[in-house]
Amino acid sequence: MGKRKQKTEVDVVLIGGGIMSATLGTLINELNPAVNIEILERLDVVAAESSDAWNNAGTGHSALCELNYTPQQPDGSVKIDKAITIAEQFEISKQFWSYLVEKGIIADPEQFIRQVPHMSAVFGEKDVDFLKTRYEALTKENLFKGMEYTEEKSLLKEWIPLMMEGRDPNEPIAATKMEIGTDVNFGVLTEDLINHLDKKDNIKLSLNQEVKDIDREDDGRWEIEVKDLKTGEKREIIAKFVFIGAGGHSLLLLEKSGIPEAKGYGGFPVGGQWLRCTNEEIINKHIAKVYGKASVGAPPMSVPHLDTRFIDGKQALLFGPYAGFSTKFLKKGSYFDLPASIKLSNIKPMLSAGLDNLPLTKYLITEVMKKPKDKLDSLKQFMPTAKLEDWAIEKAGQRVQVIKKDPKHGGVLEFGTEVVSSADGSIAALLGASPGASTSVAIMIQLLKKCFPERAKSDEYRNKLREMIPSWGKSLNDDPQLCEHTREKTHTVLKLK
């Protein structure tokens, strides 16, 4: 007889030790402290993949500077509805983080969030016209009040001196600026939240745990087979609810569940690299997150930006990211991840999306082949005086973009995040990438509403939600006084100047 596997029972299993599981676990614990939770992480530390500071842009994505959230239409107008939604969602995150600071769950907000101006910069007459149109459209909205715009070279030298040095004085250039932008270290935030949860008697963090299989029991609960990567021992966990927040691996784990809702979903992996500045003098000359326009064919995660970061308590300066193609679904994943994700149910959408996105594939392969000198040429558009000896290559995180069924095209490549859940709400997975981490609170609240609809209707639930997020259910963009009051409070609590 074989050795009998250890079996435990919990209310909730959270797969993945990143910002999504940390946020969902914290929300569940605040809304119902009695819920038993186990957090499973494949690596020996939490927040080591997409949530790690070096693996993401660290931008508090609030659509203040990201041009891919405001696409230009054929008639020349700029579509801003996505920007408004993302800006609202980031305000929800800030309110929740403020609540956690006031409650003492987060000790020092300056360890994970700092105010850094968010700017957009464009070059050439066509893009200058686009940026001005964008500015005029956004500044009619409450969430974007205070945005500044300029084409004046003298003012640009004050805003972005590093970018103006050595630049052709006749080159058309324009920029917008929002002082209230933020830099967020999601790695530190994730560690704070999970460390807080791990101290509770009814919540357990288990590291070096790889989920091998997920099966539904006859009673509707889920059996998760887990292997300890240190000891090699296997065990089983029975859970009423399972959340899969394992970054790129979420798709592979979702497929193991066998739920019909997962059929037709595929994944397209996108890797990346940064140029990291090693010259302290240059680093200190630039304090802003400056986003430009993506190259033709580039994925949204590759929008170029010259980016002030605060990592390990030190100011840093990054440029990129440079996209690339890899069959891995995680930075510390396997080259067999992509082949393993292909099933009969998703092969048609994946082939269709692949054929429709051949320019993207070509672009990514070209990016992989770029030498350091080629990468420097891209940086020089932002910083004409850049020298290769002042920059080092840093590997960025791995992203998996969602491919889903489409009745017209067979399959389409989606840029964004998507929650896929079973009909009964007992299992859910988060797929996709940006702006995920920044909008994690809103995404996880919507997940709770979808998976626990009756609980979400209760007065107790709603009252607690409003305690954590005072503006919940209201639009800050439609209420200028509420918007101003909310930002004033969160910025005070989070120590944002």
Image (cartoon, rainbow, N blue to C red):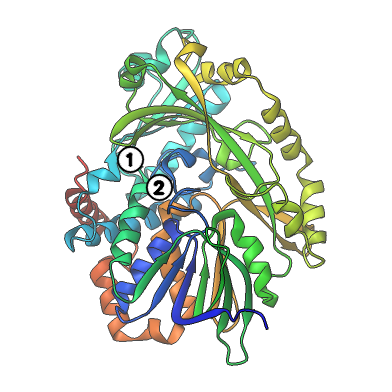
* Observer-nearest of 114 and 234: 234
* Observer-nearest of 171 and 417: 417
Q: Name the residue that disc number 1 marks.
A: 181
The amino acid type found where label 2 is placed reads Ser
Q: Element type at marker 2?
A: loop
Q: Residue furthest front?
A: 1
How crowded pointer 1 is (Cα within 10 Å; few <14, some 14-19, many 20+) is rated as many
Real-space Cα separation, disc 1 to disc 2, in angstroms: 8 Å
Query: How many marks overall?
Result: 2
Please say whether residue 91 is visible from this viewpoint.
no
Q: Name the residue that disc number 2 marks.
A: 62
Q: Quadrant of residue 496?
A: top left
Q: Quadrant of the N terminus?
A: bottom right
The amino acid type found where label 1 is placed reads Gly
Asked if disc 1 and disc 2 are in contact, CB closer than 8 Å, the reply is yes
Q: Element type at marker 1?
A: loop
Q: Residue at the location (64% across, 61% down)?
A: 251
- 291 left or right, relative to 469: right
Residue 135 position (above or below residue 427) = above
- 138 left or right, relative to 249: left
Q: Residue furthest bottom?
A: 219
Please say whether residue 483 is visible from this viewpoint.
yes
Q: Quadrant of residue 458?
A: bottom left
Q: Residue at the location (30% across, 20% down)?
A: 284
* Observer-nearest of 286 and 119: 286
Q: Residue at the location (46% across, 9% down)?
A: 385
Residue 361 position (above or below residue 392) = below
Q: Position of residue 497 (x, y in %)?
A: 19, 39
Q: Position of residue 219 (x, y in %)?
A: 58, 92
Q: Quadrant of residue 449?
A: bottom left
